[in-house]
Amino acid sequence: LNRVDVFRVPAAMLALQVIALILLFISLMADILVERQAGANAVLRSRGASRMQVMACLITQGVGLAIIALVVGPPLALFAVSTVALRLMGPQAQGAITLVLSRPAQALLDVGWYALLTALVILVALSLLFRRAAGMNILSLRRESARGGRGTLWQHLRLDGGAAIIALTASGLSLYLTRLGNQLDLSAKTLLLAPLTIVASIFFIFAIMILFLRFFPLLLRLGAGAVMRGRGAVSMLALAQMARSPRYSARTTLLPAFAIAFVIFALIFNSSQAQRITAIANFEVGTDFSGIIPTDADKLSLQDVMTVYRAIAGVTSVTVGYSARAFTLGSYPVIPMQVLAVDASTFASTSIWSAQDSSQPPTSLMRKLIDGRSRAINTLQVPCIVDAAAVQKLHLSPGATFLTVVNSEAYNPLSCVVVAEVQHIPGINNSASAGNSANDTSPIGVLIDYQTYYSVFSESSAKFGAFGGTTPPFNHVWIRTSDDPAAVAQVRAALQTKRLRLDSLYDRRSLITELNNDPLYRNLTGFLTLGAITTLLLALLGDIVASWLSVRARQAQFVVFRALGAAPRQVVGILTWEQGIVHVTAIILGGLFGALLAITAVPALIFTNIPASGLFANFSNNDFFILQQVVPPAIVIPSSLTLILTGLVLLFALALITMLWVSLRPSLGRALRLNED
């Protein structure tokens, strides 16, 4: 299974979701604009025009709009790509986009079929709306205006129940696959879980939306009945109007609700993905810099090596130790193992441990290794810290012992006693939740103190004589630096010199930069950003247009209120009540939809690719899939979310103020003047 294929299916489903959301906005806007001409169409039908004639007139308008959109849309797309998308993509994608933009005519021809297909889909959606509008006459239009309770297709087909069944089925399948654990291959699990989770979240939202459309009129009627018992005429008139014709309120509620939901989802996904990249880089390197001491380096003592690297400007802590592959003794099949023997007195300040790696602080863990030094010499058992994969495979617990062969010293196996268990040891790729195929090849992790290991191995080697083997020297260096960019640059330059050079050098900050510039990551985040901007603009435009058309259609009603003695502030109060209910409901629904998407879909979509070149380029597919499980995805709520939601509330307030100005602008005498016709 190709690594990119794992995320290609979820990305394609997400793209279809964004396209469907945009088409939904267009459909809702078209429905509002069709209703604007409902009165004229009803007059034509009442005066003898056939349904086909009205339908042909409306379709002609739709075809004209589709042609204009087909002509204007692709150049606008090129403009958006050159001004917005180009800045969101990584360096590799920028070169490809620049090449495409250098041949605009060919680029327009390449996307012409997509534009034509989009125009046809919009035209079909308009035709379905025109079919209903063409069948309305004056009588049916007035009935519809007075009684908005006509059943719709989704009500007759019970689509809310069907969507809920699909969502529950997909959720059940994903939960079942998650609990299969070792019985399912990790790559297959990764490929199947993301699409199922996305399908479940989409249909859950669809079911909630239809339930809202089903019960929203009932809630409005209950609210109108409740306020009628009070003394407030303004709230009573507002709720009575909304309850009599709830279709407009429901549509104008869904427009901003979906936009808010998608903005919340996009922001949380981008922040969570960025946090995931940092967490993976911290785990893979384990510190700021990590590397192997070259075999041709000067032979120095452990303390001298620490002093040499500690003298580099910008370095705050250094740990020297031994890293080697090993295997368990006495188990079948043989279980591979990665042993890290570190200087326990400095490793806590040098390494980077997260709460997901261990619930205990590293200082407490290293203290346990240091406290066991004297006892280890007497018992020839080295205190060790094991990860969750080792506990699962060897059935270990604190106090348990096991034998391991380090550096192929089969005649002198190392006896280890477990003093602590952690979820992960930074730098060792394995996962307790991986499938059998991954667990067979991924090593379990063991962390020990180098001084204790050296003393115990030397003592046991002396007992075995010629068969005891030689004590392995230290071969690995971990370096922690300050976050100052100038200091980091100095450390990087120093580690390239002959005297301080390290083989297989891992640079945590460089890895973060590479992962942030990964083409797949940049494309997905750029697509989500553009999708959020597009849906937000469409929702705001639709909200303003719908509000303006609603006020224009009801101007005579407001003038009658004023002629009967209502003060302008009472008219303003009616509109404020109506729009307040609509937008507060939209914010609540949008927050609910966004939270549902964030909780269900974001963890499934978060991924971690690996650089195409460098040390990580040799990662096997097995290591790649394990990497997706090592650090569980975390949902991060960005601080910018509050600012954007506040801005949306201000824009909604601006739309309300504009609508109030339109409603109060005409004078009573001008508005009540008889039509000259």
Image: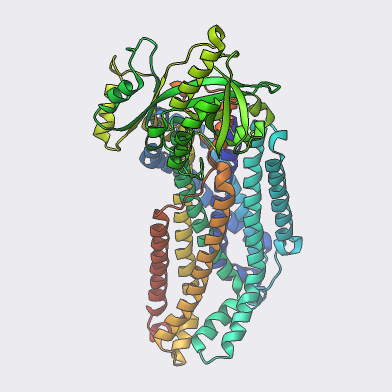
Identify the residue at the far right of this view. 157
Which one is nearer the viewer's eye here, 404 or 43?
Answer: 404
Looking at the image, the residue that sits furthest to the top is 466
* Number of numbered discs visible in the structure rendering: 0
Q: In the image, is 167 to the left or to the right of 467?
A: right
Q: Name the side, left or right, on which 290 lies relative to 6.
A: left
Residue 192 percent location from the top left of the image: 66, 38
**Picture residue at 39% right of the left edge, 79% below the top:** 664
Furthest residue in direction front, as rendered:
378
Residue at 28% x, 28% y: name it.
Answer: 310
Location of the N terminus by quadrant is top right
| Residue 395 position (above or below residue 131) | above
Q: How is the image coloured?
A: rainbow
- Whether residue 252 is visible to the viewer of this picture, yes or no, is no
Location of residue 26 in the rendering, given as x and y in whole percent from the top left corner: 54, 55
Residue at the spot x=47%, y=53% of the render?
263
| Whether residue 324 is situated above or below residue 183 in the rendered picture | above
Q: Is residue 357 above or below residue 547?
A: above
Residue 328 is situated, as x and y percent measured from the top left of the image, at 62, 22
User: Residue 245: x percent and y percent?
Assistant: 60, 75
Image side of residue 480 versus residue 410, left or right: left
Q: Nearer the viewer, residue 134 or 148?
A: 148
Residue 420 can be seen in this image: yes
On the image, which quarter does residue 241 sit in? bottom right
Residue 52, quarter of picture: bottom right
- Front residue of 596 and 634: 634
The residue under the point 41% across, 30% down is 511
In this rendering, is residue 224 above or below 497? below
